[in-house]
Image: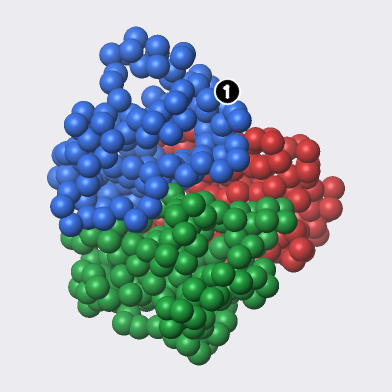
Chain colours: A red, B blue, C green
């Protein structure tokens, strides 16, 4: 379990499963496995107890780029938490393929690339460049579920 | 043809193929089949005759969340209409994988999750949880083609 | 090398690799190859020297729809440049599957479909309808990296 050893080495813990606020219904799966592919729903950053983690709002306005980077890093941990529950072992991921990084952006904010790096930097650190390096989109959205500053989804390949 | 029987049971009819307004050119395929995968372009909600269906505008402003939910449900029918034309039989879909649900959102609107549930709830009702449950993104966009309140695209697996 | 011959016939040259401005870090791969699939990151339109190409700003405001169309066409060339570097031969692409076309859109701008056609029209012209026709999303975003008017990513299949 190399990835989990690496997480521990970095002092990082995976959050509890996402707890959506009252009135928000998740009519979808956080993770959809099919053959050698895993489709990962858009995850918000989570607190250790699984509640969406602040600061809330738009990067470039209420949320600073540095806080946005940190939120993207927390979102990586939220996704790893979902993957671990479904796959058992995070080392089963054989390739990170495509990442859909979405930034809740103030209209004039153009540094979305650096924000989503908070996700990518951690994934590459944990998995190494060969498995971890991925293609990516990093647009700025006018609104995201729950008002979180970033939401990130992905497609990964697994060993079957 | 279980899915179509279920549609009839629910009193739901599939719309005609999408008719785009004059001046809008679709330089793409509504559905792209390759091997055991089908890539589904972003569809708008359609009226029975295939014209984009109102109400138009932004959810959280001109369009209510409930109307947005209903628009997402209509978009599911538009996608099923395209799939039926290309696949012949809707039962050929063996798994709904990833859904890109996009909400035309007013800046402060954070309930995009519930809006796209209008799509997901119907797909799971029609296909059952094993085939129908999917991963999903549900961001809020500042603008969508034609001014419709939702646009939804997807990737599904088919039996070949 | 049919696609490159076609490019030359059209008088089109591929730009240099993307050069991001100081302070923007790309913690991702422009192209991720895995098995018979290639995942293409969101690319901006590029000048011949690889720097992001203007006009910058929002389509429907500072950027006209026609300029947006041209930017989408330049983005196709940027993606082909990345694919050529990684694949060696552009003819290895056996199918364009899904395209994520994102328009930096003014709030009331609903003609995003026609803007992204600048990408799709060129790809179909270069590859022909059987290989080149793809499914597509074409939403309007409130912000894009670097302030460019369009960013486009994709998934394609290759012969292995």
- In the rendered image, the residue lying farthest to the top is B9
Q: Position of residue C132 (x, y in %)?
A: 48, 57
In the image, taking residue B42 as reference, residue B131 lies left or right, namely right
In the image, taking residue B95 as reference, residue C52 lies left or right, namely left
Q: Residue at x 61, y 65 (%)?
A: C91
Q: Position of residue A38 (x, y in %)?
A: 64, 42
Q: Nearer the viewer, residue A44 or A94?
A: A94
- Residue A41: tell me if it is visible: yes
Q: Nearer the viewer, residue A70 or B156?
A: B156
Q: Residue at x 44, y 72 (%)?
A: C75
Q: Taking C127 as reference, is B150 above or below it?
A: above
Can you tell which quarter of the image residue C68 is in?
bottom left
The secondary element bearing badge 1 is classed as helix
- Residue A58: tell me if it is visible: no
| Pointer 1 local density, CA inside 10 Å: few below 14, some 14–19, many at least 20 | few
Q: Which residue is mark 1?
A: B130
Q: Residue at x 22, y 77 (%)?
A: C62
Q: Residue at x 49, y 52 (%)?
A: C130
Q: Nearer the viewer, residue C89 or B102?
A: C89
Q: Chain of mark 1?
A: B
Looking at the rendered image, the quarter that the C terminus of chain B falls into is: top right
Q: Position of residue A110 (x, y in %)?
A: 40, 74
Q: Taking C92 as reference, is B145 above or below it?
A: above
Q: Position of residue A40 (x, y in %)?
A: 58, 44
């Amino acid at each position: 379990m190399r990835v989990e050893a690496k997480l521990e080495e970095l002092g990082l813990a995976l959050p509890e499963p996402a707890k959506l606020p009252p009135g928000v219904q998740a009519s979808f799966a956080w993770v959809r496995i099919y053959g050698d592919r895993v489709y990962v729903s858009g995850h918000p950053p989570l607190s250790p107890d699984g509640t969406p983690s602040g600061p809330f709002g738009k990067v470039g306005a209420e949320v600073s780029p540095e806080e946005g980077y940190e939120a993207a890093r927390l979102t990586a941990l939220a996704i790893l938490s979902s993957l671990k529950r479904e796959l058992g072992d995070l080392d089963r991921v054989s390739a990170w393929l495509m990442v859909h990084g979405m930034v809740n952006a103030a209209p004039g904010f153009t540094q979305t690339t650096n924000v989503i790096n908070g996700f990518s930097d951690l994934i590459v650190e944990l998995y190494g460049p060969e498995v971890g390096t991925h293609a990516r989109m990093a647009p700025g959205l006018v609104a995201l579920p729950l008002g979180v500053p970033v939401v990130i989804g992905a497609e990964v390949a697994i060993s079957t």
